[in-house]
Image (spheres, grey):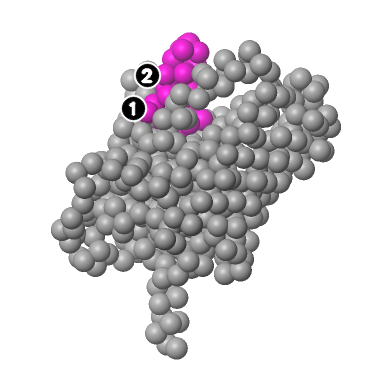
Amino acid sequence: MHGTAARARALHGALAAMVACQVGLHACAQGVRLAAPLGVLATGGSAWSVGLVMTMFAVFPALLALPAGRLADRRGYHLPVRLAACCALAGTLLAAATQNMFSLCAAAALSGAGSGFGMIAIQRSAGRLASSDSERLRVFSAIALAPAVAGLFGPMLAGVLIDHAGYSWAFLALALLPAATLLAAQAVPDEQPCQAQAPLPRPASAWELLRLAPFRRLLFVSWLVSLAWDVHGFALPLLGVERGLSASALGAVLAAYAVASMSVRLLMPLLAGRLERRTLLVGAMLLTCTVFGAYPLLRRAWAMAACAAALGIALGMVQPAIMATLHDVTPPERHGEALALRSMAIHTSMAAMPLLLGALGTAAGAAALFWLMSAALGVGSMQAGRIRLDHDR
């Protein structure tokens, strides 16, 4: 009994430290995501220059994902997270020293790389804290709170300081966040050598993981979920303008999504033991499919807000389920590489999809984007239903 209580306390302590580490890295990146483009415009940069800076946030995490995953598999938690924090720290300090195009691009690249690099190590180690399916779902529900918290705190910190103290002080304040990550990481226990450093046989290429059908299907589902976020963020303003909604009404719709997503992630640790993983994956995908199909049929802001809340619930539920399932369908010694392939797919999509979505939206309209996404999510729900069948065999 005492051993169980001690283990629970150790789990909660390590998990809280990991969440704090990810908040520090992600809030820094989100703050730079606001400050760097504004800095470009403040120095007379063009819209093309802003686009270049924003591209840095996606390109470098995609390029560094596989080395980050392999390093996490070889060395465990601490070295990758320290390197990630140092990258973000260097980028923000460089931008604090001088706001020119080079330093702002470097800040975007290094903070984006730090966030992505650290996320892989944190997610890999978080999955290893759990000893059961329900516990793993609770762990990833807690980890999923970090981006939501960081997405609120980082931009708010940057925006307030830019207005009241200037860009240098804003970047200096953002530099404190990865510095805090370095401190918080000390509370995460070291992995045992047999987990982090034992020489384990592995295929020569990370791409051979794609031969695993459950992982391949899960990667497709994960990419669809990420794409759904992108399409919603891109197409909703277009649809709102077509429907004649005001900016404040659209803001309320997006707020409904954010509140619902945060709420369901807070509730997930309480519900994890009562939810079957495949049911959760398939149900969330079908709900998302339904929401995207219904959006273009709606005319009023309150109805769109209800759809946005349902979408927040669905995507808030599915993310922890995806992460927990990934740890089941890949070899334990290759979790880092599996997370890296997922990160590469998501960040490559983030870099390429805005141009494609813009072209499709211009040619076919916002409603077509929603309906295409709905059809893709319907296919994804079928793939999600097959993942556990393969895993059980």
Prevailing SS of the magenta stretch: helix
Question: Tag 2: residue type?
Answer: Asn
- Residue type at tag 1: Ala
Q: Is residue 209 visible?
A: yes
Secondary element at image label 1: helix
- Give the alpha-carbon distance from disc 1 to disc 2, as whole Å: 10 Å
Q: Earlier in the sequence, mark 1 or mark 2?
A: 2
**Residue at the spot 23% in from the left edge and 41% down from the top edge:** 205
Residue drawn at (71%, 24%), measured in percent from left and top? 367
Q: Position of residue 251 (x, y in %)?
A: 71, 33
Q: Nearer the viewer, residue 90 or 366?
A: 366
Instruction: Identify whether 246 is placed above or below 220.
Output: above
Quarter of the picture containing the C terminus is bottom left
Q: Quadrant of residue 306?
A: top right
Q: Is residue 188 left or right of residue 12?
A: left
Where's residue 359, x and y in %? 57, 15
Which of the two residues, 296 or 210, is positioned nearer the viewer here?
Answer: 210
What residue is at 31 percent from the left and 66 percent from the top?
189
Q: Is residue 212 above or below residue 98?
A: below
- Name the image quarter holding the N terminus: bottom left
Report crowding for label 1: few under 14, some 14 to 19, many 20 or more residues within 10 A (C-alpha): many
Residue 182 lies within the magenta run:
no
Q: Is residue 7 left or right of residue 68?
A: right
In x, y percent, where is residue 309?
Answer: 71, 45
Q: Which residue is mark 2?
A: 100
Tell me the residue that label 1 is attached to: 106
Residue 89 x %, y %: 33, 40
Q: How many residues crowd mark 2 within 10 Å: few (<14), some (14–19), many (20+)?
A: some
Bounds of the magenta span?
32-59
